[in-house]
Image (spheres, rainbow, N blue to C red):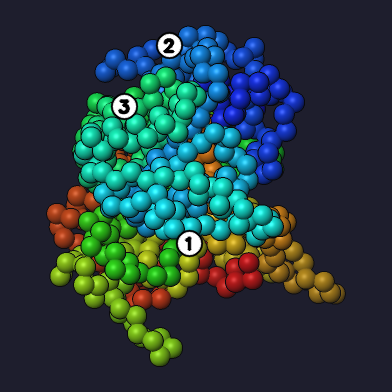
Amino acid sequence: MAATAALSFHPPAFSVSAHPREAAAATTRQPLHHCSPLRIVVPRTRRTRLLRARSSNGRPQISASFGTSNEVLDGMPTGDGAQGHQGGSTVSITVVGASGDLAKKKIFPALFALFYEDCLPEHFTVFGYARSKMSDEELRNMISTTLTCRIDKRENCGDKMEQFLKRCFYQSGQYNSEEGFAELDRKLKEKEAGRLPNRLFYLSIPPNIFVDVVRSASRTASSSSGWTRFIVEKPFGRDSESSGELTRSLKKYLAEEQIFRIDHYLGKELVENLSVLRFSNLVFEPLWSRNYIRNVQLIFSEDFGTEGRGGYFDNYGIIRDIMQNHLVQILALFAMETPVSLDAEDIRNEKVKVLRSMRQLKLEDVVVGQYKGHSKGGRSYPGYADDPTVPKGSVTPTFAAAALFIDNARWDGVPFLVKAGKALHTRRAEIRVQFRRVPGNLYRRNIGTDLDKATNELVLRVQPDEAIYLKINNKVPGLGMRLDRSNLNLLYSERYRREIPDAYERLLLDAMEGERRLFIRSDELDAAWAIFTPVLRELEDKKVAPELYPYGSRGPVGAHYLAANYNVRWGDITSDDSAF
């Protein structure tokens, strides 16, 4: 019950409820449609006290729990603040960089999906902000082409789209212009119409203008009495120094609790299910250590290349783009100790402990590759260097494999093998847990040298076709003794018929509700960069040439030698996964 309260609590000033009277019925209110039952306002009588503190720059800081009066959260007072706003509260969501691909393909569709499921408050407004000159109607026409309804509920799709688009507006302005954001503030106040104003800014823009936007928006478009939050997209710098400088610059204008660093992989269903699988099933938790696990593999592959984005990608490479954030964040969730509670700070504290226990990555434990042109089935696929936006002679890796180690009592000596690549043979993201062999196995003669049968393996497929399956040995029916490798599987498409929400839907809703569990704290970021910065510098200083691999292949051969160094074979090269 305590864990539930930690997840579901929201102070009245930050509630997504449309009217104050809903708070009184919070204990009996049923969630709307597919919204989680945990997304319910907890009555004031059940809250605990907040230890008030201020950050080094004088701005308010949040603790893990909340008080009952005169509280401080997200830089603004709460307590009875909503009582002065007879119309209740409202949420204004501003998508900065509204004309970009991420906004059109992910953010606006995610907001519509939340509206479609009745997960947004009754009073909300969506604004787009960008340099492009555009009218409200032109914005609506632009985003309407990307909105879709749930497959299992299309009967009122057209009506819902029309209602959503009526709440979408546009403001043109420069990203470093306080005048532009002041005009946005004026329009927001018109829409808020005397209600308690809460404001969320989504920075769907290049990282080099994060600080300009935050400075201008925080000074001229922050909420005067509600909360103001900023969602920041990766990349969060290129190394420890640039990441630290970005954090320090943002904190000149924002408190840490106002900054929501988003990694959309943390919002994916199977990643969310990782802690449930481990901590709510007795069969797994006792096995989750070096005593039973031989190695862990985190695999990310895309079956397409940079496709005209080479100029952007070349400044970062696959290690910064995928491995240092997506895969290491999943690794931290996988390997952390049991947190005190499901509170965001308790979970993030445990993740930081894991990251700080990890060894700095060394060059001998890394293999880098770059895809080259290849012809297959009568079609030619260009290499990375053939992309006209890529600098000539670039040695930026489009593939990387690495062996990581956690120096603590639970994981000492267990290799965590991670690999990520573009233009590979398939699209997938998965976690593979290979267990140790059965000591003194009675059936070793039947198994022989078959490594697959000698090792049980738990696989969590994050994408596509979400699934969890456990590879076990069993006897083939018949009079003889023949062993077979079988899968105990949970295929989401068969078990759960409704469409799985996109990760951006969950993360946007969490940001509006002040739930930080799936967002990255600044000390997490520092610890993650500390693992990779030395090897990234060495790769660049020595201009290490990546091993070439054909477009559509399984990647460079060197990745297999790296795994073999630790007596491991990559789990995604076997054929028995094809049926799943």
Vertical side of 483 occupied by 471: above or below:
above
Q: CA distance from mark 1 to mark 2?
A: 46 Å
Of 384 and 161, the residue lying toward us: 161
What residue is rendered at 57% in x and 38% in y? 120
Of 561 and 142, the residue lying toward us: 142
The spot of residue 216 in percent (x, y) is 25, 33
Kindly identify which numbered label has been placed on residue 52.
2
Kindly identify which numbered label has been placed on residue 226.
none
Kindly identify which numbered label has been placed on residue 145.
1
Amino acid type of disc 3? Answer: Leu
Which is more foreground, mark 1 or mark 2? 1
Vertical side of 452 occupied by 254: above or below:
above
The quadrant of the image that shows the N terminus is top right
Amino acid type of disc 1? Answer: Thr
Q: Which residue is mark 3?
A: 254
| Label 1 residue SS | loop
The spot of residue 365 in percent (x, y) is 32, 55
